[in-house]
Amino acid sequence: MQLEFFGVIIMYRKKLQLALKELENEAIATLQKAVQIPSITGEEENVQRFLEGILKDMGLETDLWYPNTAELKEHPAFDLVNHENLGKRPNLVGRLRGTGKGKSLILNGHVDVVDPGTETHWVQKNPWSGLIEDGKLYGRGACDMKSGLLAGIFAVKALIKSGLPINGDILLESVISEEDGGCGTLACLARGYTAAGAVVMEPTKMSLMPAQLGATSFRLTVTGLATHGCVRYQGVSAIEKFSFLHQGIIEWEKAREEKIDWSQLFSGYPIKAPISIGTIQAGNWDSTVAEKLTAEGRLGVFLNQSLKDARNSFEDMIADLSAQDPWLAENPPKIEWFQAAWEPAAIDPDHPLVMSLKKSYETTLGRQAVLEGAPYGSDMRLLTIYGNIPTVIFGPGDVANAHFTNEFVLIKEYLDTIAVLADLIYDWCNNQ
Ligand SMILES: [Zn+2]
C-alpha cells in the first residue's frame, strides 16, 4: 500500500514537472506581453481582454463584466473601497470546473498598476518594455503584480496540460482597482464568487503571509496666522506648528508599537505599522508666514484593531499634543479620513491552507518556507473578512521594488511560484 501510495505521488510530480517545463518559455513570453500592455488604475480594459483570451484558450468558463456602483453600494465594505469612475473597467473571472468532490480555490490578482513616473528614468526609457536582462523582467507591474497573476494562470495551465485530475473548482480572479482600494475583488464577492480558500499572489518574495496589517489615510490641516515675513514674530507659522506635531507623531509611532504583543510573523520589521506623511502643502508666498498647512499620510493599523479604534487613538494623540501648545489648543488641527481603507486581516498560521501551501513549497523547492506577516494592506482583507474565505498572500517579487522606477521580477521566482501553486492546487483541490 505504502509503495503504491508513493508511486502515485512520484507519478503526479513527474507529470506536473514535465508540463511545467514545457510551458516555461510561454509563461515568460506571456508575462512580457502582459507587462507591455499599460494598465494604470482606471485603464485596465486592454489587459483584461488579453487575459480573457488566454483563459478562453485554456478552456475555462469566463465571466468578464463591468462592475458598477449600483451592484456594490449595499455591500458592507462599500465605503472601504474607491468606487469612483468605474466606467469601462472590466473584471474577469475564469472557472475550471473540478471533476468531483474536492475543495475549491480562488487565485486572485490585480491587473491595475500605479503610474510609472518619469518614463525616461526607466531602462530603455520605457516603463512598458518588458525587457529581460540578467534573469530579470522589467516594467511597471512586473512585480506588482502581473507576475503573480500570470503565475496563477500558468499553474492552472500546467495542471490542465499534465492531464492530472482536479476535483475542486479553481477560480482565477483577475481584478481591477486594487491599488486604489479593492473595488474589483469586492465586485467578485458581490457577484457571488467564493471558495474554500484563496491565494492573493501579491509580491511576498515567496514568503507565505497569512496576516496583513491595515492602513487608513488621513488629512491633517493646521492653521496659523499670516503676516509679512519681516515681522514673522507677529504671526504664527502653520509649518512650525506642524513640525511640532510631526515630532510628536514619530514618538507616538514608537510608543504605541512597544505596547503591542507582536506575533512572530512581524518580527522582521523595524517599524511594523508605520505612520507616514506622504504629502505636504503649505503657504502661498515666500515672504509671508504660512497660514495653512495640509499634510496627508497613512496610519498603520494593528491586527485586532478596528479602523475606528486606530482613528480614535490618532485623533486623541493629536488632541493631547495640541493641548500642550497655546496656539494649537485655541486652533485645533482638523483631521479627515479619506480614500479607501484597509482593515487588518489574519488567519491561523496553522490553517490547513497555509499547511498545504507550506508542504507544496517545501516539496517543490526543497527548502524551508518562510512565514511572515504583510506590513501592507491588500485584497486579502476583503476575501477573509467579508467573504469568509481563508486567504494567504503568496507571490513572486519584492514589494520594496514595487511602485518604483525599474520595477522588476526575478524570472526564477516567477517560475518557482508557478510550480508551487500548481502543486498547491493539486493538493488542495483533490482533498476534502
Ligand atoms: Zn499589488
Image (cartoon, rainbow, N blue to C red):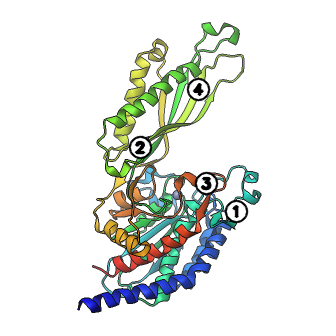
Q: Which of marks 4 and 3 is in front?
A: 3
Comparing marks 2 and 4, which lies closer to the viewer? Answer: 2
The residue that mark 2 highlights is 272
Residue in the image at 40% along x and 30% along y:
252
Sequence-wise first label, 1 or 2: 1
Q: Where is residue 406 in the image (x, y as percent from the top left)?
A: 66, 56
Q: Is mark 2 within 8 Å of ligand 1?
A: no
Q: Name the residue under label 4.
A: 293
Q: Residue at x 31, y 46 (%)?
A: 304
Residue 18 is left or right of residue 122, and the answer is left
Q: Are marks 2 and 4 in contact (CB under 8 Å)?
A: no
Q: Is mark 4 on a helix, strand or loop?
A: strand
Report x, y in % for residue 339: 51, 45
Q: Reading the chain from its start, which is encountered first: label 4 or label 3?
A: 3
Tell me: residue 320, above or below residue 337: above
For marks 2 and 4 on the same chain, the one whose residue lies earlier in the sequence: 2
| Residue farthest along the left direction in this orientation | 1
Tell me the distance, in whole angstroms, between the alpha carbons under discs 1 and 2.
32 Å
- The residue singled out by tag 3 in the image is 114
Residue situated in front as seen by the camera: 128 or 305: 128
Which image quadrant for residue 15?
Answer: bottom left
Point out which mark residue 128 bears.
1
Q: Is residue 348 left or right of residue 416?
A: left
Label 2: element kind: loop
Mark 3 beta carbon near ligand 1 (under 8 Å): no
Residues at marks 2 and 4, CA–CA distance in whole angstroms: 28 Å
Q: Looking at the image, is mark 3 or mark 2 nearer the viewer?
A: 2
